[in-house]
Amino acid sequence: MSDDKTPAPQVWPTLRATDARALIRFLVDAFGFQEVVVHGDGDRVDHAQLAWPLGGGIMLGSVRPEEGDTWPLRPGTFGAYVVTDDPDALHARALAAGAVPHLDLTDTDYGSRDFAVRDPEGNLWSFGTYRGEPRAAASSAATP
């Protein structure tokens, strides 16, 4: 359920960072994420939410040694595919901001224009124009 202030339920990929504040600045500058909220004191980020201009977003925070193995994804182990309308411009922006190239701009056999880069923490970010296949009609969709 949602109201005027809360977005509809969504999937929010999450990650941890050794320097979350620097990673937030990078994701905003290099890729165009929009900073929505950052909670935490000093260098530590307890929770941050970044929105993607075309919808959805990510949540992230500082790695917390006291968590032990309760959060098994260590910094640099995250990967995501993000839809963009202009991969060529985003590719240039990302490289200019210091993203490490992983896969050059390429046209796929399924009609997408894609590229992939790594952020300063080593996370893999793939961007492309592929928006996924249409969903089946609600009556034929499986119920979880």
Image: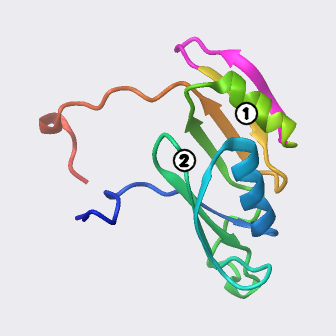
Q: Is residue 127 above or below residue 77?
A: above
Looking at the figure, which quarter contains the N terminus?
bottom left
Looking at the figure, which quarter contains the C terminus?
bottom left
Kind of residue at badge 2: Trp
- Judged from the image, the secondary structure of the residue bearing numbered disc 1 is strand
Q: Residue at position x 78%, y 37% from top?
A: 94
First of labels 1, 2 by sequence position = 2
Q: Which mark is residue 116?
A: 1
Residue 50 located left or right of residue 131 = right
Residue 4, x across and y down, in percent:
27, 62
Residue 57 located left or right of residue 75 = left
Q: Which residue occupies the foreground of this view, 4 or 124?
A: 4
The answer to the question of whether label 1 and label 2 lie on touching residues, with beta carbons closer than 8 A, is: no
- Judged from the image, the secondary structure of the residue bearing numbered disc 2 is loop
Report which residue position mark 2 lands on: 52
Q: Is residue 90 above or below residue 29?
A: above
Asked whether 142 falls inside the magenta stretch, the response is no
Residue 87 located left or right of residue 53 = right
Residue 53, x across and y down, in percent:
52, 43
Point out the stretch of residues depicted in magenta.
99-112
